[in-house]
Amino acid sequence: QVQLAESGGGLVQAGGSLRLSCAASGRAFSNYAMGWFRQAPGKEREFVATISWSGGTTYYTDSVKGRFTISRDNAKSTAYLQMNSLKPEDTAVYYCAVRRTRRSGTSSGRYDYWGQGTQVTVSS
């Protein structure tokens, strides 16, 4: 069992930055891939970024490439999402998730554990 807790969300002006953190319980975190997803009001949850167990492979949805960076510190059982040049359309609840495999993935259905989410609001 893995429990996840996101933090770092908040209100920021367009062009600003935020860093989200995802703290995981359990020693197995270092063996698992993880991802970030988001859900805006009235929309379905969408993939944002994913990282393999070692951090060696990352993948991003096109709309955040060049602006967001996913990383992880397995010694701290924590993953991060650095978000720069934020836009109003980035406003959403952001969720971190873990899948019980080393390979990263973009499909939410393939993730086994989820955090409670953290709100990110970008004002124009």
Image (spheres, rainbow, N blue to C red):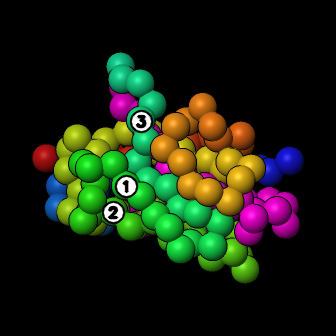
Residue at 85% of width from left, 66% of height from top?
27
For badge 1, the amino acid type reads Tyr
Residue contact at pointers 1 and 2, CB within 8 angstroms: yes
Q: Is 32 inside the magenta-drawn segment?
A: yes
Q: Residue furthest top?
A: 42
Of circles 1 and 2, the one toward us is: 1
For badge 3, the amino acid type reads Glu
Residue 8 visible from this viewpoint: no
Q: Residue 122: where, in percent of width, then height?
A: 26, 48
Q: Nearer the viewer, residue 25 or 109?
A: 109
Classed neighbour count for the residue bearing mark 2: other residues with Cα under 10 Å, few (<14), some (14–19), many (≥20): many
Q: Looking at the image, how many numbered discs can be counted on the residues?
A: 3
Above or below, 5 relative to 51: above
**Which of the two discs, 2 and 3, labels the residue nearer the N terminus?**
3
Residue at 26% of width from left, 50% of height from top?
62
Q: Is residue 61 left or right of residue 45?
A: left
Q: Residue 34: where, in percent of width, then height?
A: 60, 55
Q: Is residue 14 left or right of residue 37?
A: left
Judging by the rendered image, the residue that carries numbered circle 3 is: 46
Magenta residues (range): 18-41
Mark 2 to mark 3 CA distance (whole Å): 15 Å
Q: Quadrant of residue 78?
A: bottom right
Judging by the rendered image, the residue that carries numbered circle 2 is: 68
**Local secondary structure at mark 2:** strand
Q: Quadrant of residue 25?
A: bottom right
**Local secondary structure at mark 3:** strand
Q: Quadrant of residue 85?
A: bottom left
Judging by the rendered image, the residue that carries numbered circle 1 is: 60
Residue at 28% of width from left, 54% of height from top?
64
